[in-house]
Amino acid sequence: MPSATRFFKIDEPFSFKKGGVLPSITLAYETWGELNKDASNAVLILTGLSPSAHTASSPQDPSPGWWEPMVGPGKPIDSDRFFVISPNSLGSCKGSSGPAGENPETGKPYRLDFPELCIEDIAASAFELVRHLGIERLSTMVGPSMGGMSALAYLQQNPNGARHFLTISSSPNSAPFSIAIRSLQRELIVSDPAWSNGNYDDKNWPETGMRMARKLGMLSYRSGEEWRERFGRRLQDYFPTELFGMNYEVESYLEAAARRFIHSFDPCCYLYLSRCMDWFNVADGFPDLTAALAAIQLRSACVIGVGTDILFPAYQQKEIADALSQNGVETSFTNLDSLMGHDAFLVDYSHFTPLVTDYFNEIWETEPLSA
Amino acid sequence: MPSATRFFKIDEPFSFKKGGVLPSITLAYETWGELNKDASNAVLILTGLSPSAHTASSPQDPSPGWWEPMVGPGKPIDSDRFFVISPNSLGSCKGSSGPAGENPETGKPYRLDFPELCIEDIAASAFELVRHLGIERLSTMVGPSMGGMSALAYLQQNPNGARHFLTISSSPNSAPFSIAIRSLQRELIVSDPAWSNGNYDDKNWPETGMRMARKLGMLSYRSGEEWRERFGRRLQDYFPTELFGMNYEVESYLEAAARRFIHSFDPCCYLYLSRCMDWFNVADGFPDLTAALAAIQLRSACVIGVGTDILFPAYQQKEIADALSQNGVETSFTNLDSLMGHDAFLVDYSHFTPLVTDYFNEIWETEPLSA
């Protein structure tokens, strides 16, 4: 399988916010386009919970990435203009150090021996990657979903870290409804006997917990309005043989989505990343959000939310936009009228493409970057 | 423990919509007030999934009922004026025949030997009770949540069954998002090893499945907006000792609610009632909802939905109201601006009391009933 993924190893102790230390960590990442001479055209994309670093295809790896229509030559985030970087989050299982990675002390996966992880750790590790690539200040920071939290933490840690900021369907902290959803997802996984306090293996995998957690995730990622149009009350093709089995198309849709997920993501990494979102509040230690973002030096920000998003409700994006505006950042806020809920940025390109295209055109036109 | 609950035994074969037959069934019910001479002042309240027949207190049982502020002397549904009847649903476990009841053939609970249950069966059994009480036509049919589905089925089966109709936070069928939620709840229960295909007992109870199903239920009954105001990001008093345990107040709130529920409802009854909601569509076999309700003879209808309800979204109440209006029924529709989501009718009395009071006053004033 061709891969465009590279690995950046930080060969010195990495200290986690909650006190853990690892002697070294690795980040998997991909890039698109070329860094210009004065290193002024870099775009950093920090991801949501589950994506890998493979954000888009490239000559090295032509398989479609998780944000394929958005990144590449001539695309909204145009790699003919910008040098685009996307790491797999610290704590994930797609090549970066995380609970699924090998603990050099034991030769086995870290699992619960991996240090407690915070959004701030994901941000700090991404900063090390950016510095390693020779970039002092990003042109643009991009953060959808959890990536928007990591982006806020990055900018708080590095007030001059970027000139522009695109945040999508994210939040300055986890709302209690979102905490409730994620808390229940974690409970579903650890309640599966196969979870076995982290001592699962390929043959004894918490499949039931992962299946149900993913289904609950899907409920929080989409919207009733979308499913009303998409599925209505259509029955599925076959009648269930199992008692209390599935009757309706919406049920088999969720089952198929869950089955794809069960073995594609590590349960322990899922728990760590889920929990770190709940813990995150960029305003912790500040009187309010405006104060928390006051030091950040941005020329512009583009904040996008979706009206049907129940996981990162649009009022939270409005809070980010208001706080940036109050700090003098030229900020646009769009509450998008999409049926697709939290997942809109991944599936509703007819709504998202024009907004992202316009924002990056503006950036390009207001400060032409050297080639 | 004092009880106002009476039992009505139908001592002849009861045929279920999907083909099952029981030689007899029993409905538990309570009443408030007195039936007048011409039996014209009866109000039937059909309940949501979990309530018992104890809708309100009475001299026989002074403990508060599930709709205490709404039913009784001088209350919005005024038992000084009306004879109010509320049965425990067929299929439930609060005294009526259901999967938890004793199968006379075996002396053990029916469990999965109970016939497949539909909303239409709940309606048909309630009609037998009404007839048994000497009532030809109800003054008013009241149906919140699942009870509104049962009420629609009752009126479809008995087009002259009531003169007035109050339906709250209900629907003419289950939306796919609601099916998805309930399907996952059922999966949570049957995935619990203690479910054991219905062979659980008091010592071996599917507690984990019931706990998680109830938490998911709570997510669907309330709203993010409410929890944002109520809990915010407040931490709970004690720090979790369990790994991936609870940190936030919203999590301990859900845990407490779930623990109260686990042993208060029978898992098998829960599965039957949950599934019958998914199956229900009052328009099945008709070209559309208006045609499905065309035969129903009502003088008025009051339809109330709540904007923040994600389980029975307000557009579904609007569909009921529109169909009744198109059939010439004088119908009012209110989309209530409450933060309380689906549960608003149970907790947001400041919004609901005036609406229900006004509707019953109107009924009383436009057709004064004999004492």
Image (cartoon, coloured by chain):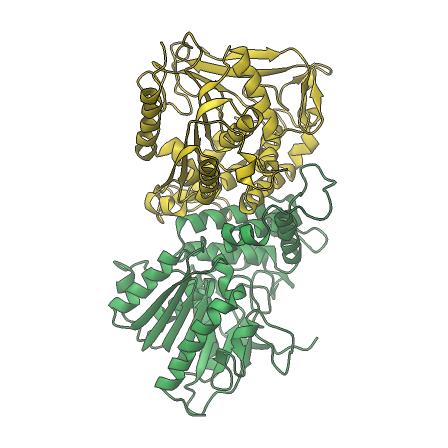
Chain colours: A green, B yellow
Task: Name the residue furthest front.
Answer: B328
Q: Locate residue B130, reporting x and y percent.
A: 52, 16
State whether residue A10 appears in this view. no
Q: Position of residue A186 (x, y in %)?
A: 53, 49
B230 vs A358, nearest the viewer: A358
Depth check: give the residue in front, B258 or A340: A340
Residue A228: tell me if it is visible: yes
Picture coordinates of residue B187 (x, y %)? 62, 41
Image vertical order of residue B161 relative to residue B244, above or below: above
* Left/right of residue B72 with respect to residue A75 in the rendered view: left
**Screen quadrant of the C terminus of chain B:** top left
Query: How many labels sit on residues?
Result: 0
Residue B191's image quarter? top right
Image-based side of B332 in relation to B172, left or right: left
Residue at x-position 53% and y-position 65%: A346
Q: Is residue A14 left or right of residue B204?
A: left
Taking the spot 55% from the left edge, 49% from the top edge, the residue there is: A216
- B222 to B21, vertically: above or below: below
Picture quarter containing residue B103?
A: top right
Where residue A130 appears, as percent x and y from the top left, is 46, 78
Up/down of A41 relative to A273, above or below: below
